[in-house]
Structures are given as C-alpha cells and as structure tokens.
Amino acid sequence: MYSNPAFPKLPGEFSGKWNHKRYRVVRPLGQGANGAVYLAEQAGKKLAVKIGLDPLDLLMEVNMLKSVQQLPKQQIGPLLCDVDDLTIDGQNCTFYSMEYLEGERLDRYVARVGVEWVPVLAVQLLAHLHALHGQGWVFGDLKPENIMMMSANKQLRLVDFGGVTKMGNAVRQFTEEYDRGGWQAGDRRAEAAYDLFSVSVMMIRLMTNEARWKKVGHEKRTIQDLCDIIRENDNLYPYRAPLLKALYGKYPQAMMMKQELMAAIRQRNVTPPSKRGRSGSVASALLGGLFVASMLMLAGTLYHLWL
C-alpha cells in the first residue's frame, strides 16, 4: 500500500463540519495513494473512515459507492455511511465513512482453503465487475489485497476504491504485478478488458507456487511468461481458454469471461481423470467425490444468482 506522510492524522475524536456525526478513532488501517483509512466508531458502530487532501479524488470514490450500492441483490463494496469535511490544524480535509468489512484477504483465504477454489471465487468476482462496469466504472487497482472474503456470509467484496476510474479515462492507480501495461500487454485506458486482464493474472498468481512465480522477472514481463506458467500448471491448464482470452483482451465484457469460466469449471469436473491428460496431479486427486459436488453446487448458485 502506498504511503503519503502529507495526509493529516485524524484526532482521537472528531465531528463532521456539516452533518455533525461524532467519531472515535480506534486505530489506523492503512494508506493509499489518495488517502488514509482508519477504523472508527460512530454511535456504537464500527466504520472505516477515509480522509484525503483532494476532495475531488474522494468524491469520485463516493459517487461510485453510491451508484453501485443501489444495485438490487448485489453488494460489491462497503456501504457508504457519511460524507463530510473537517479541519485539522487549520487544514481543510474531506472524509467519508463506510461499512467496516470484517473478513479475510483473498490471497490469505485461498492459502487456507486451497487453490482449487480460485476459479469459483473468480466467477463471483467477475459478477461484481460486470455490475461495476455497467455503472460506467473500472476498478483499476485490482489485486488480492483489495478483495475481501466476508466472514459472515462467505461472499467477496471489493475494498480500497482509490483506483476506481471512469470508463475511457486513464487508470488512476495500479499495481505493476497485475497491470496490463506492466506486462507490455496494452495501455492503461480504463475499460472492462483492463480489469479482466488483472483477474487473469490474479488467478495465475493465486494458483502458482511462490518459487515458480518468482522466476518471472520484475522487469520486461510479457504475456509469454504467463502462458508458460499456464502450460506447466495442472491447476491452471483446464482454464487456459478464458485465461488467455482475458490476457489478450478478447473479452469486451466481464459477463463473457464469467460464462466461459463457468463452462470450463463444469468441463473440468465432468471429464474423467483418465482423459484429462494430467491425472497424476494433486489437483486431479482433489477434484473428486464430495469436493466436486460442493464446488459445482456453489458455482451453480453463483451463476444463477448473478446472471
């Protein structure tokens, strides 16, 4: 996460200038490129408070949160609770408060439950992105650290909206490891394909062991490096078609990638191990019996819920 010492430090207790809601700061949660985030309490409720110096930057995030939280039956990110100003040491600042999401970061969740669940989780993520893109926004800085698995209902939610960008504009924030430009695979124009490239890289990263991933250099990364990993990896190979199409920008919409990934999941689970060509892999052994049944059940539920 980026750090900027210029961001003012929130006092232990403060009230908004206009709405007069009173907050008690519990602890800092981190900093992004355009603001600092704190855990706070307001009227006995835990909230995340983001404060920044550029009100236009924060208001873009606020407008996005407002637009997506009105979508029926779908929660993409935290619920917006308050937007206000305050003065700290004579400096005027804008802040907003939002629902505090309690859960587990995507990469840590996958490390605990197993890489076999990554394609199903990606289906849910793609449904969120399809809805976000439909509102005219691109998430931009898409990475496992910005995706949370909620403890209460085991649903994914997006966090840290500092990189959210209007379609057609230059992406505001990105992380080189998941950035299309960083892999010499295209520009940084905000479009659905930009986010989908990041989804593909995330799937590859989450399903690849650390030693293999480190073999990919930090300089002069190319799509060929990712193709090599897909070809070598028994867990990734069954999903090569949607992964490669996303890497090469062939999907104009997240829904198309979601549907083809769902088809790959189904095909992976109905193909007999003897005909998979990679029957000696650990993944092949695990994808059987009750695991297959539960995976198909969850995937099918998500597919129909977010169509």
Image (tube, helix red, strand yellow):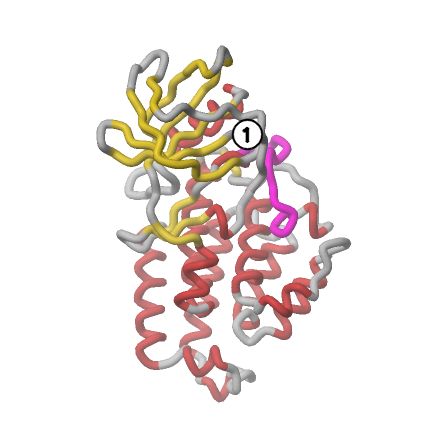
Instruction: Point out the residue furthest to the left here.
Output: 44
Quadrant, the N terminus: top right
State whether residue 300 is above or below residue 293: above
Q: Nearer the viewer, residue 251 or 85?
A: 85
Q: Residue at x 52, y 87 (%)?
A: 280
Examine the rendered structure and indicate whether residue 282 appears above or below residue 57: below
- Give coordinates of residue 122: x percent, y percent: 45, 57
What x and y, as percent, mark residue 13?
34, 23
The question of residue 176 being in magenta is answered with yes
Question: Is 15 in front, or is 78?
Answer: 15
**Residue 299 inside the magenta-drawn segment:** no
**Mark 1 — residue?**
34
Q: Indicate the position of residue 260 as horizontal and vertical percent values.
A: 49, 60
Magenta region, residue range: 164-179
119 left or right, relative to 305: right
**Residue 214: percent from the left, percent from the top?**
66, 64
Which residue is farthest right?
220
Report crowding for label 1: few under 14, some 14 to 19, many 20 or more residues within 10 A (C-alpha).
many
Q: Please tell me whether residue 6 is drawn above or below residue 211 in the rendered image.
A: above
Instruction: Residue type at mark 1: give it.
Output: Asn
